[in-house]
């Protein structure tokens, strides 16, 4: 089998199968980390040395109570405070779906079709039967939690860029962030991407939810059987760019990162990025303070850390993410 390093360095158009770049033996650390194996100690150390300059810190977790009107049959977070020792102390109890607020999509979240097989499979060929077996933690969130995510973060602030150009859109529509716009923003901000970067794309979902939408509009979204989510366009060119640039993970304040529903019957980025490459997808990150800080400092790169929940067999997790400038 082609070794890990050569596959990561192989151009997209030369991959044996760009939809199934599966690493490691079943159940292994390498399989469980997926593309996060790119975040080697050397990559992390170099990012820390070049990006941590002022010590300013910005977190990227939206309130756990948001989306307080979620769609896709997801439930809002419930938080109870309970007394302990007759009121001498208190505990709290959370009932939550991590997908309802800021979250990493784990490798158990989304599957893909494989030619010759009737059932869809997850990264590495993991089956739904394996995921439903609670004694099986293959490609579970515990792999990411044990090592954490750390490295160089890069922000593409599409929301600010579009606003300056008079481009109006709702983030609850099928508005597409084009690859050409991402590249234009990178050029204008003098961003040079590095292998192992963690890409953040801000389109303004959390801002619109918090400052524009009424309660009635939020309820209407929650009740919509066919919701629309603005996001990055899903094209072969986007896939090629994500792979050839060498990102270790991607994240956004969007609900599904890519535009939803898919605008093409041929390409759904989740099938490639999660089920094919083992690359984390972050969604509903609160990037508002991050964008303000980047604008103030006139730099759109930073050191980023994230410590997912250490849940064996976990499907997703709050990111517990922080940018350090």
Image (cartoon, grey):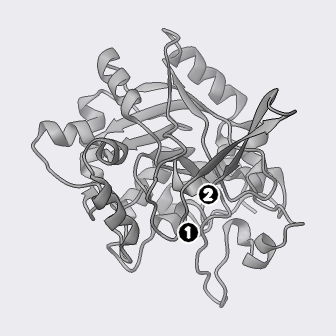
Q: Which residue is pictured at 52% across the width and 50% down the height? A: 101
Residue 305: quarter of image = top right
* Relative to 23, 29 lies left or right: right
Q: Which residue is mark 1?
A: 19
**Residue 203 location in percent, x, y?**
31, 46
**Residue 173 location in percent, x, y?**
26, 63
Q: Which residue is mark 2?
A: 97
**Residue 267 location in percent, x, y?**
42, 72
Is disc 1 surrounded by few (<14), some (14 to 19) or many (20+) residues within 10 Å?
A: many
Which element is circle 2 on? Answer: loop
* Relative to 323, 180 lies left or right: left
Report if residue 319 is visible in the image: yes
Q: Earlier in the sequence, mark 2 or mark 1?
A: 1
Residue 293: quarter of image = top left
Q: Which residue is pictured at 67% across the width and 70% down the height? A: 122
Query: Which quarter of the figure is the N terminus placed in?
Result: bottom right
Which element is circle 1 on? Answer: loop
């Amino acid at each position: 089998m082609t070794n890990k390093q050569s596959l990561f360095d192989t151009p997209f158009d030369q991959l044996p199968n760009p939809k199934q770049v599966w690493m490691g033996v079943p159940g292994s650390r390498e399989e469980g980390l997926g593309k996060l194996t790119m975040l080697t100690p050397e990559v992390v150390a170099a990012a820390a040395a070049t990006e941590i300059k002022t010590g300013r810190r910005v977190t990227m977790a939206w309130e756990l109570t948001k989306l307080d009107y979620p769609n896709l049959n997801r439930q809002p977070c419930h938080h109870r405070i309970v007394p302990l020792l007759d009121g001498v102390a208190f505990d709290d109890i959370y009932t939550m779906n991590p997908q309802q607020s800021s979250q990493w999509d784990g490798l158990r979240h989304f599957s893909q079709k494989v030619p010759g097989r009737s059932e869809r499979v997850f990264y590495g060929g993991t089956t739904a039967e394996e995921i439903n077996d609670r004694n099986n933690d293959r490609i579970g969130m515990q792999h990411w939690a044990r090592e954490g995510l750390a490295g160089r973060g890069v922000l593409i602030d599409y929301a600010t860029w579009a606003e300056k150009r008079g481009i109006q859109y709702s983030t609850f529509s099928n508005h597409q962030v084009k690859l050409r716009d991402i590249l234009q923003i990178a050029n204008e901000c003098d961003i040079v991407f590095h292998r192992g970067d963690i890409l953040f794309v801000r389109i303004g979902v959390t801002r619109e939810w918090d400052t524009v939408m009424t309660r009635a509009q939020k309820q209407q979204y929650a009740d919509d059987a066919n919701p629309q989510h603005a996001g990055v366009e899903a094209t072969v060119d986007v896939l090629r760019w994500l792979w050839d640039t060498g990102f270790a993970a991607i994240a956004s304040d969007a609900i599904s990162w890519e535009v939803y529903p898919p605008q093409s019957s041929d390409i759904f980025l989740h099938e490639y990025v999660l089920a094919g490459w083992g690359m984390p997808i972050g969604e509903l990150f609160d990037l508002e303070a991050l964008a303000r800080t980047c604008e103030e400092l006139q730099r759109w790169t930073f050191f980023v850390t994230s410590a997912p929940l250490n849940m064996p067999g976990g499907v997703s997790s709050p990111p517990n993410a922080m940018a350090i400038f």
